[in-house]
Amino acid sequence: MSLGLVTVGAGRAAVIERLGKFRVVLGPGRHFVLPFADRVRVRVDLGEQILSAPPQPVETGDGKEIDVGFEVVFAVTDPRLATYATTNPAIAIEQLARTALRQEAGLTTAERAVTAPGDLHRTVWTVLHDTTGRWGVAVKELKLSVRPPAAPGTPSTAQEWY
């Protein structure tokens, strides 16, 4: 910011604070702000973002382990909420998805999780959708990859659910 001029690029937004307190969200274009009183708190990407997590072992309710990985496509819908409701939406979404996966996997058997991952998908989707809406973020797509851990030297086929 120089001399009270803020430029915001296409597909982005800027959260402006005046003397440390939220003032306004600026869309793409050039905007005049008060020098020394207003500052850009953060610039937010409004496009779709992809968050991938490699498969990790998760214990099921029957004491066995399965490997679960996921990919989440999300977009910021409210820059103000995304800035103030959570420190980093991507990290928060990743932690929330991992927690929901662990919790739901603990309530099912390994065989059911691998052969019918729809229940896992539905639960994680519901948790992500309900929670991220309060953060000003919309989850557009969730892809899970569920498979039993491979025995040494044996390839394992993953069941994917969209």
Image (spheres, rainbow, N blue to C red):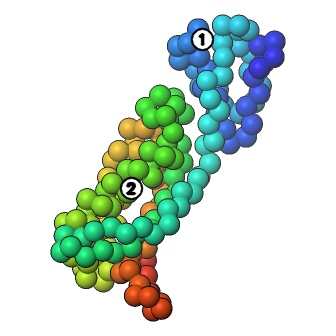
Q: Residue beneath label 2, please?
A: 97
Q: Which one is nearer the viewer's eye here, 10 or 88?
A: 88
Q: CA distance from mark 1 to mark 2?
A: 35 Å
Image quadrant where residue 124 sits = bottom left
In the image, is 20 to the left or to the right of 67? Answer: right
In the image, is 75 to the left or to the right of 100? Answer: right
In the image, is 31 to the left or to the right of 122? Answer: right
Task: Name the quarter where the C terminus is drawn.
Answer: bottom left
Q: Residue beneath label 1, please?
A: 18
Which residue is the extreme one toward the front? 152
Kindly identify the residue that appears in the image at 43 percent across and 77 percent down: 160
Q: Give coordinates of residue 109: x percent, y percent.
A: 21, 76
- Please, is residue 4 above or below residue 61 in the view? above
Q: Give coordinates of residue 51: x percent, y percent.
A: 54, 57
Which residue is the extreme one toward the right? 3
Kindly identify the residue that appears in the image at 37 percent across and 69 percent down: 57
Image quadrant where residue 131 sits = top left
Check disc 2 and give the amino acid type: Ala
- Look at the image and tell me whether residue 133 can be seen: yes
Check disc 1 and give the amino acid type: Arg
Q: Give coordinates of residue 136: x percent, y percent.
A: 46, 38
- Please, is residue 129 above or below residue 59 in the view? above
Circles 1, 2 touching at the beta carbon (< 8 Å): no
